[in-house]
Amino acid sequence: MTVIGLFSLMVGVGTTNAAEASGAVIGTSPVAVIGPGHVFLNWVPGASSTLVRTSNGISVSLQTSGLPAGHAVTVWMLIFNNPGACGAGGCDETHGDLNVPAVQGSVQHVTGHIVGSTATTTFAGHISVGDAANAFVGPGLLNPYGAEVHLIVRDHGEMLPGSLVEQFNSNSPTFCNVACFDIQKSVHLAGA
């Protein structure tokens, strides 16, 4: 089974609720440890991410564990605004789907902080429709209910004194202490 197939199966087990009064769609998915090339290694016990989708944007909450204390860690949203245009097998950033023009793919910074010494770490943020100010590439979020979203947890290494803002807001190797690594991933299919 492919990594995307495995994620799709597990995401299908996640919860989705339509909050009729607010027009919100809420979906929860597990978090996986990934290796180079975004290869699935294993699930993070008890970890999950939740998306709240509204017509104004997507709010993200991700609770995980196993992150290195003292490191600058960020969460990035890989947005496939038109997932129907992805290749066979579904949307997969390692197959270049973010670069297919019809997909309207985007990579956007969500949040980040220095990991403390506690066992669990929580990240939260919001991406507004049409706001590409924090997009590394692409148009940002265009289709909040229909986009497929992959959340990537990225380790930037130990905090770099005097460069904290750049370390949190840059996908550049310049602001990685030694090297940056994508270490965890959570997938939310369209509408979930």
Image (cartoon, grey):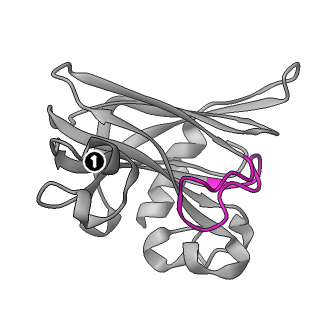
Residue at 73 percent of width and 66 percent of height: 82
User: In the orientation shown, which residue stands out farthest toward the right?
Assistant: 21
Instruction: Locate residue 85: give its quadrant.
Output: bottom right
Instruction: Locate residue 48: give its quadrant.
Output: top left
Q: What stretch is highlighted in magenta?
A: 129-148
Residue assigned mark 1: 42
- Asked if residue 105 lies left or right of residue 116, the reply is right
- Asked if residue 16 lies left or right of residue 60, the reply is right
Camera-side residue: 183 or 5?
Answer: 183
Residue at 61 percent of width and 79 percent of height: 87
- Asked if residue 184 lies left or right of residue 85, the reply is left
62 up-or-down from 163: above or below: above
Question: Can I make out residue 83 in this image?
Answer: yes
Which quadrant of the rendered structure holds the N terminus? bottom left
* Residue 35, position as x, y percentages in the image: 24, 60
Camera-side residue: 81 or 15?
Answer: 81
